[in-house]
Amino acid sequence: MRPDWTNYGKEAVVRAKEALDHSDEFKAYIIDWMMPDLNGIETVRRIRRVIGDSAPIIILTAYDWADVEEEAREAGVTAFCSKPLFMSELRDVLAQPFRVPEAEPSVQDSSYDFTGKRIFLAEDNDMNQMIATAILEGVGFSVDIAGNGLEAVVKMKGSPAGYYDVVLMDIQMPQMDGYESARQIRSLDDPVKAGIPIVAVTANAFEEDRRLAFDSGMNGHLAKPYDIKEIMQTLRELLSKSNE
């Protein structure tokens, strides 16, 4: 992307008008909530008067936006991105408006039937735990959860060999991250436990992150937010290989 910037809301409005006049419109705007002259919402409102609905506008803030979300949406805010700024989150927020929507397969699709399989989910975020559990139980999995990487290793050590069929491993977790957790599982004495399929599930989807996952002994790499079709296909492939 070709970026431009300013410290002031009023100048941002002027820049938006100049870009439009020169047929070189901005494809996206990232507006800080707190600026010296205008707040972010008023800046968005004025930019929308200039550009209409031609580009997404993202509010960047360190505060809880729940109380002003309705006002912000009415002003023309497309999305929110929190501070401190993480590359993976910003990338996903920027990419979202430009994605071509695809028809998601139903989790009840008969082609995805994992009845009798037990999956181990290592995930520290409560909301992600609920979303993943609903998706996985919808296709027949029994789901066990660990809230961090250390707990995942402890549970794997204490479970009978073959108790779990596959592991979904978040990367950024407290106490022990997913990479180290995968390495410790791979080093277990029991070859059945050590050889369980492990899939990284992370918001960090760059090639370097994929390489780190595979270097840690993982068998797959899935990006957040959850893509149901990709999750189902990856799990089916890994479980088919493990049954050969």
Image: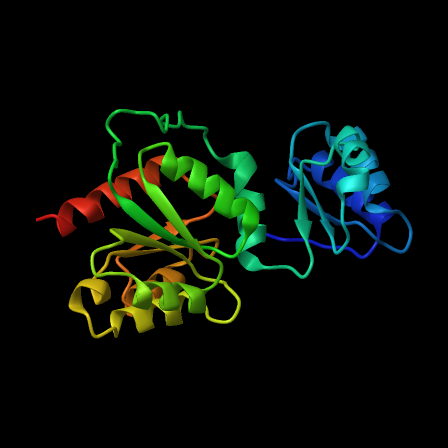
Q: Is residue 55 left or right of residue 63?
A: left
Q: Residue at x 51, y 46 (%)?
A: 128
Q: Residue at x 49, y 47 (%)?
A: 129
The answer to whether residue 216 is visible is no
Q: Is residue 201 left or right of residue 86?
A: left
Q: Nearer the viewer, residue 192 or 170?
A: 192
Q: Position of residue 181 (x, y in %)?
A: 38, 68
Q: Nearer the viewer, residue 225 or 75?
A: 225
The answer to whether residue 129 is visible is yes
Q: Position of residue 237 (x, y in %)?
A: 20, 44
Q: Nearer the viewer, residue 210 or 185?
A: 185
Where is residue 26, by image quadrant? top right
Q: Nearer the viewer, residue 77 or 176?
A: 176
Q: Position of residue 47 (x, y in %)?
A: 78, 36
Relative to 45, residue 208 above or below? below
Q: Residue at x 75, y 32 (%)?
A: 73
